[in-house]
């Protein structure tokens, strides 16, 4: 601590022995030792308090940085969600306007004449009109957000080899044994 060598300590000890005398020297040495111990503990406590304060300040800075980055991330997420919501709402509006146009067109279509109904021509005209309006609605709606694929429809009755459906009473029976 003070960079005192052994020879210098010997000189200090001899001077203290001469000045204080042999009766008081042990008491003074003991008291000096206790005081030096208290001083060392006090210095180490002050150092540890300073270190704790520095670490606390660093933790507060890190906490503030984390809070700022979390707020920035939240702002980014909110802006992205707003963009997605506006895109969806515009797609829904264009799709609903296309559906409204389709409904208006279907309501304004004159009823088919009996000749066209009998020959099946009115179905082709209406089908072509619906296909055209559906294509327009798809153009207005933009790309689909979610595609819902319906399950495949199974045939009503399985066709099996060797069944003669023309024979009465043989429906569902196989000729193979």
Image: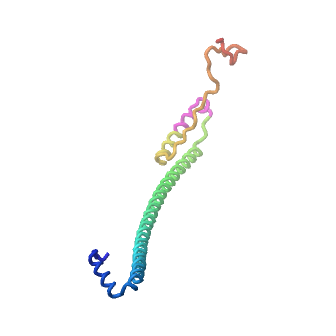
Q: Position of residue 167 (x, y in %)?
A: 69, 13
Q: Give the quarter of the image for residue 164.
A: top right
Q: Position of residue 92 (x, y in %)?
A: 52, 51
Numbered circles on residues, count: 0
From the viewer's perspective, tell me whether residue 80 is left or right of residue 119.
Answer: left
* Residue in the foreground of this view, choosing between 44 and 174: 44
Q: Which residues are magenta?
A: 114-128
Q: Position of residue 75 (x, y in %)?
A: 46, 62
From the viewer's perspective, tell me whether residue 71 is left or right of residue 1.
Answer: right
* Residue in the foreground of this view, choosing between 28 and 115: 28
127 in magenta:
yes
| Quadrant of the drawing holding the N terminus | bottom left
| Quadrant of the drawing holding the C terminus | top right
Q: Position of residue 15 (x, y in %)?
A: 30, 84
* Residue in the foreground of this view, choosing between 127 and 78: 78
Give the dominant element type of the magenta stretch: helix, strand or loop: helix
């Amino acid at each position: 601590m003070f960079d005192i060598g052994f020879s210098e300590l010997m000189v200090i000890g001899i001077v203290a022995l001469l000045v204080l005398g042999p009766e008081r020297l042990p008491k003074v040495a003991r008291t000096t030792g206790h005081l030096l111990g208290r001083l060392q503990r006090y210095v180490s406590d002050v150092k540890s308090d300073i270190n704790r304060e520095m670490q606390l300040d660093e933790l507060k800075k890190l906490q503030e940085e984390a809070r700022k980055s979390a707020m920035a991330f939240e702002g980014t997420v909110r802006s992205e969600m707003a963009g997605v919501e506006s895109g969806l709402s515009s797609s829904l509006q264009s799709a609903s306007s296309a559906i409204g146009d389709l409904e208006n067109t279907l309501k304004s279509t004159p009823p088919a004449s009996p000749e066209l109904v009998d020959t099946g021509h009115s179905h082709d005209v209406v089908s072509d009109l619906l296909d055209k309006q559906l294509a327009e609605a798809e153009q207005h709606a933009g790309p689909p957000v979610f595609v819902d694929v319906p399950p495949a429809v199974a045939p009503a009755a399985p066709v099996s080899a060797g069944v003669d459906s023309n024979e009465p009473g043989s429906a569902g029976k196989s000729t193979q044994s």
